[in-house]
Image (tube, helix red, strand yellow):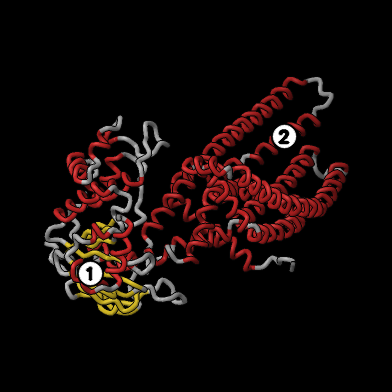
Amino acid sequence: MQKPKITFDRFGQIFFVFREIVKLAARADTKFLVLVLILNAVWGFLAFPGFYLEKLVLDNLVNNIGNVNFRPVLNVVGFLIALRLALEFLRNLLSRLTGLLNRNMSRSFSMYLEALIGQKLSELDLATIEDPDFKNRFEKIENESGRRAWGLMMPLSDIPNYLVGFISAVFVIALLHPLIALGVILVSLPQFIADSKFIKMDYDLHTKHSLLYRFWGWLSYYLARNRNFMELKILNLAPYLVKRLKEIREKILSDEIALQKKREISHIGSLFPMSIFEFLISLWLVFLVIVKRVTLGSFEFYLRSLRSAQSNLVGLINALLQIYENYIYVVDLVWFLSLTPKIKEENRGIKVLKNGNYSIEFKNVWFRYRMDKPWIINGVSFKVAPGEKIALVGENGVGKSTLIKLIARFYDPQKGDVLINSKNLKDYSVRGWRRNLAVLFQKFETYPFTARESIGYGDIKNVEKLKAIRRVAQETGMDKFIESLELQYENPLTPEFEKGIDPSIGQWQRIGISRMLFRTRAKILIMDEPTSNVDPKAEEAIFKTLLKKTKGNILIFVSQRFSTVRNADRILVMDKGRIVESGTHEELMKLGGLYHELFTIQAKGYR
């Protein structure tokens, strides 16, 4: 490996990281940050008045050895010692206070980062979030954010005391001779070079272990998550997973220990120049004392200042190196926070009609998720009239869910247009358009909070309106189940909370449907496999409700159950990214095509 050099580029990187950390910390809590920096600077400065008081005590003692009139000397020395102890008490008090503030600031910064990352992620569009390159980079940010928060804030808060301490010490040493101050800096460089070299080696090792860390995360997940316990026990997987964990641990630790050994040996070697320098300066100070050019107290004062300058400079360098160690993480974090969505969620644009009398039209739409991948949607054209009920059917992976994402404008097609009332969807306000959509995705969210919240999130402004929430729960048949719970609508929907319960998949699906029905201002209801885990009786009741609730509005649903599909005004049959058939159930059965084939296969299963 080529030896790293101290270049302006490296200092530039350190400055960049330092600047970005300060900006983030200031955004988290400016007053907190300023207070911590000031207190740390004061703590660092107060060391030198203490050194000077020790010099005065020592000089008074030396000058008055054998003095029979000891009372005046005792009073002066006693006062100086009292001041020294008071100063030390103040430094201890400041040390405890800054330690408390440092821990609180680090915790506050960590929580702020977590919220900031979550907020930023919610602002990005689906095209960005689902991009594999983004996922890989974001995973590093997410995994490192908690650990790095402390690593970022502690060096930042320590820099003022090291910097003020070093400047104060150098000022004192410069009074003795300016070249000594310069020598302190020069003999500290070997340690800086050695440590910076091993930071780079740490990076390389962490990169080498990245796949192992990812395996570790998954293995830990499957061992620790409650919902996996039953399968773990049935399959007796735990011993095997634990064995894999131990193998990964041994590999990671052996490599890290080997590197740490090299680092410590290098560190010890870098201490020799500093030790030799201190030895030579100490001899010179001894000579100055002997020839009576400085007092014994001054000897101690200069020697303490020399050691303080060395330790503060080393501390300052280490703090900067710790910040530099976080360079890659901070670069990734800054990159993430500066991302802008490809689909702008602007409030400007055509306003969506409040009466809901609009049509949806696909005109020769082509779409694929990546340019190097096959087309998912191949030249699709169809139109949905105002108030029409449309069913999408077809085998898995033919593009049904992708059509829904295009309607919701999570993605834009590469070719062709999606039109709303004959105007391009791109010309509409994204937020305004989505306010008119109620979409239950195939992989919908199961919120673990109260039943009221899990339904009420459909219209967050009305999440406290229990009467309206209870009404939609009745429409999906969930009211009796919820009211049977100990806390009813305030009951948590996870066993992880006190008195929480674990709904079945079918119950979760009906809660999800309730959440979309609670979105009463939405004029287009889209359901992707809405009743796949609901019993047939409940399914029939739910679809009657959906048809009733969406009267005059558009309803689009994806389903593999043909008993449900028959309720649609029109059925669109998809195959390999295309719409190959369109019509009512009766028309498609007479056609004898793909729909007839799929219906016949499913019907045989019920015979």
Query: In front here: 290 or 495?
Result: 495
Circle 1 residues within 10 Å: few <14, some 14–19, many ≥20? some
In this rendering, the answer to whether 419 lies above or below 232 is below
Residue at x 42%, y 50% (from the top left corner): 115
Query: In front here: 132 or 134?
Result: 132
The residue pinned by badge 2 equals 54
Q: CA distance from mark 2 to mark 1?
A: 101 Å
Q: Secondary structure at mark 2?
A: helix
Q: Secondary structure at mark 1?
A: helix
Circle 2 residues within 10 Å: few <14, some 14–19, many ≥20? many
Residue sitting at the far front = 607
Residue at x 28%, y 70% (from the top left corner): 573
Which quadrant of the figure has residue 18?
bottom right
Mark 2 touches mark 1? (CB < 8 Å): no
The residue pinned by badge 1 equals 589
In this rendering, the answer to whether 391 lies above or below 486 is below
Horizontally, is 94 left or right of 470 in the view? right
Q: Earlier in the sequence, mark 2 or mark 1?
A: 2
Amino acid of disc 1? Met
